[in-house]
Amino acid sequence: MSASDAEKVLGYVFKDKDLLRLALTLPSASGENNQQLEFFGDAILEFIVSELIFEKGGSEGEMTDRRKSLVSDAALDKVSRRLGLDSFLIRSKSDTANKKAIPSVYEAVVAAIYLDGGIKAAKKFVRSTLDFTKTEPDQNFKGKLQEILQSKGEPCPVYLHNDVGTPQKHKFEVILNLFGEKFRAEADCIKAAEQLAAQSALERLRELNGKL
């Protein structure tokens, strides 16, 4: 496949075609390969994703989880395959079991675009290829909290409920006693209030660095 075919997939036209070729070349094919670009691209990608997640806001723990979900090998493998980057890889005929190559080529391409067109071009590529709509943190805060407590041999949390609404508008208060502290939350339904209280407890747990 030609460089122009790859550029159509990437949505970016390289001024330096050698950079694109290098980003797609595996060590099995040549001593001049994409390993250095992969290393550089990993850092650039983490910066771009971190900046975009920071704009959305959230706790440090939530933002870290979102970033991990976007830049993990499993996530980048899916993106690379969806773009068809695996079909553009330049490798030896015997190189068929290199599982790391497919997610790594995405990182190498990010670096190549950055070196060729600057940070603006790299950001545009990342924004257009990664799905940031699926980066919301896991909403099952109750389940996550219970799992952590059980792993530490702690009892399951107990949620106390109070109806603080009116006949015209339901509202429930939930109180969670944990770590010698009270975590309060209000919502239109009990389940939502419990999740909010558990979320607050998890954030406090992160502040305590896991020390119960």
Image: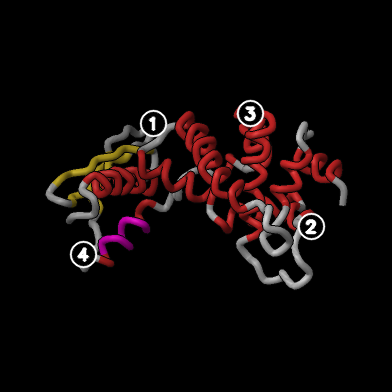
Q: Nearer the viewer, mark 1 or mark 2?
A: 2
Instruction: Kindly identify the residue that appears in the image at 58 percent across and 43 percent down.
Output: 41
Placement of 134 over or under 16, stated as above or below: below
Name the residue type under label 2: Ser
Dot 1 and dot 2 residues touching (CB under 8 Å): no
Determine which residue is flagged by label 1: 168
Q: Assess disc 4: are there few (<14), some (14-19) or many (≥20) residues with their C-alpha within 10 Å of its C-alpha.
A: few
Determine which residue is flagged by label 3: 118
Of mark 3 and mark 2, the one earlier in the sequence is: 2
Q: Assess disc 3: are there few (<14), some (14-19) or many (≥20) residues with their C-alpha within 10 Å of its C-alpha.
A: few
Q: CA distance from mark 4 to mark 3?
A: 53 Å
Q: Nearer the viewer, mark 2 or mark 4?
A: 2
Name the residue type under label 4: Pro
User: Mark 2 falls on what kind of element?
Assistant: helix
Determine which residue is flagged by label 4: 155
**Left or right: where does residue 159 sit relative to residue 5?**
left
